[in-house]
């Protein structure tokens, strides 16, 4: 049993590495991937110049593939989780998805209002409710862009709005909670400082006037959801490129 599992794992790794290598070589050279059973077969360099460029590109690809493989495994995991969510969303439909998020984040607001009214002010509860409204709208937009089809639309829009729909309300609630506010604000400031150190001075000058209060952190977290969603979408696209699947 263990031997079979080990062979399956080794075979899967070999398949992924080979597919990554062939995809990398296919950037500049024709007929590199999935052509073993075709009439023409895999393209091979003939002239000395072709052999030299082929070997150089092969050598450059070794560290690239080594760096991409952990990202590919992450993409497999994210794709598995994303497809489970997608299947559930398709079964629920647009109105079901919206109703689910209304219940989810409406319930969060209700719990905060009933159980933590002494901790949160009315304005803070209103902010959490507003974040829930944005999350509900984002869930509808994410579903719509996903159903519209197209990998570009899914990566550019569906994934970022899904991140907002899932994470914005709890982040807003945490920002106003005494035990979590300092943690989130401090980490956000550290990330901002690290980014500023590597950014042009003009960017620093533009962002200096911003008073990093809770409301601004809400906007920052909303903006962060887009690059995070893009990264997740790209990883899933990489997984689909290397190991396509017909699973919805």
Image: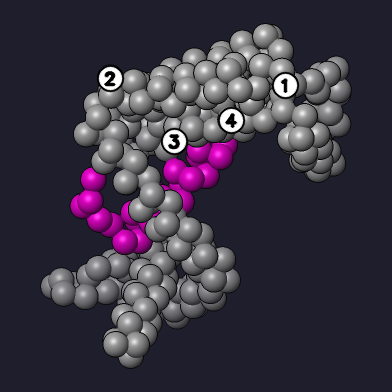
Residue 110 magenta-highlighted? no
Q: Vertical placement of 61 versus 170: above or below?
A: below
Q: Residues in magenta?
A: 226-248
Label 2 sits on a secondary structure element that is helix
Checking the image for residue 169, the label placed there is none
Separation of disc 1 and disc 4 at Cα?
15 Å
Residue 232 picture location, percent across and down: 48, 45
Separation of disc 3 and disc 4 at Cα?
18 Å
Separation of disc 1 and disc 2 at Cα?
34 Å
For the question of whether residue 160 can be seen, the reply is no
Sequence-wise, the earlier of marks 1 and 2 is 2
Separation of disc 2 and disc 4 at Cα?
22 Å
Residue 75 picture location, percent across and down: 44, 55
Q: Which residue is mark 4?
A: 170
**In the rendered view, does 175 fall on the left or right side of 193?**
left
Q: Quadrant of the C terminus?
A: top left
For the question of whether residue 210 can be seen, the reply is yes
Mark 2 vs mark 4: in front: 4
**In the rendered view, does 29 fall on the left or right side of 167?**
left
Sequence-wise, the earlier of marks 2 and 3 is 2
Sequence-wise, the earlier of marks 3 and 4 is 3
Checking the image for residue 119, the label placed there is 1
């Amino acid at each position: 049993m263990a031997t079979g599992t080990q062979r399956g794992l080794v075979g899967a790794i070999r398949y992924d590495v080979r597919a990554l290598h062939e995809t990398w070589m296919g950037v500049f050279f024709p007929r590199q991937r999935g052509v073993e059973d075709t009439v023409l077969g895999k393209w091979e360099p003939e002239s000395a110049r072709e052999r030299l460029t082929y070997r150089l590109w092969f050598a450059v690809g070794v560290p690239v593939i080594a760096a991409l493989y952990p990202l590919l495994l992450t993409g497999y995991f994210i794709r598995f989780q994303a497809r489970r969510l997608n299947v559930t969303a398709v079964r629920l439909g647009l109105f079901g998805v919206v109703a689910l998020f209304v219940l989810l984040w409406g319930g969060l607001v209700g719990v905060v209002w009933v159980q933590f009214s002494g901790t949160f002010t009315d304005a803070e509860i209103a902010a959490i409710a507003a974040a829930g409204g944005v999350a509900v709208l984002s869930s509808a937009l994410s579903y719509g862009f996903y159903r519209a089809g197209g990998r570009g639309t899914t990566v550019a829009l569906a994934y970022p709005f899904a991140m907002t729909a899932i994470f914005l309300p709890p982040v807003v609630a945490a920002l106003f909670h005494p035990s979590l506010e300092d943690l989130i604000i401090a980490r956000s400031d550290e990330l901002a400082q690290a980014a500023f150190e590597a950014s042009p001075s003009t960017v620093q000058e533009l962002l200096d006037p911003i008073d990093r209060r809770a409301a601004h952190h809400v906007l920052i977290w909303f903006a962060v959801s887009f690059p995070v969603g893009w990264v997740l979408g790209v990883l899933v696209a990489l997984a689909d490129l290397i190991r396509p699947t017909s699973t919805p």
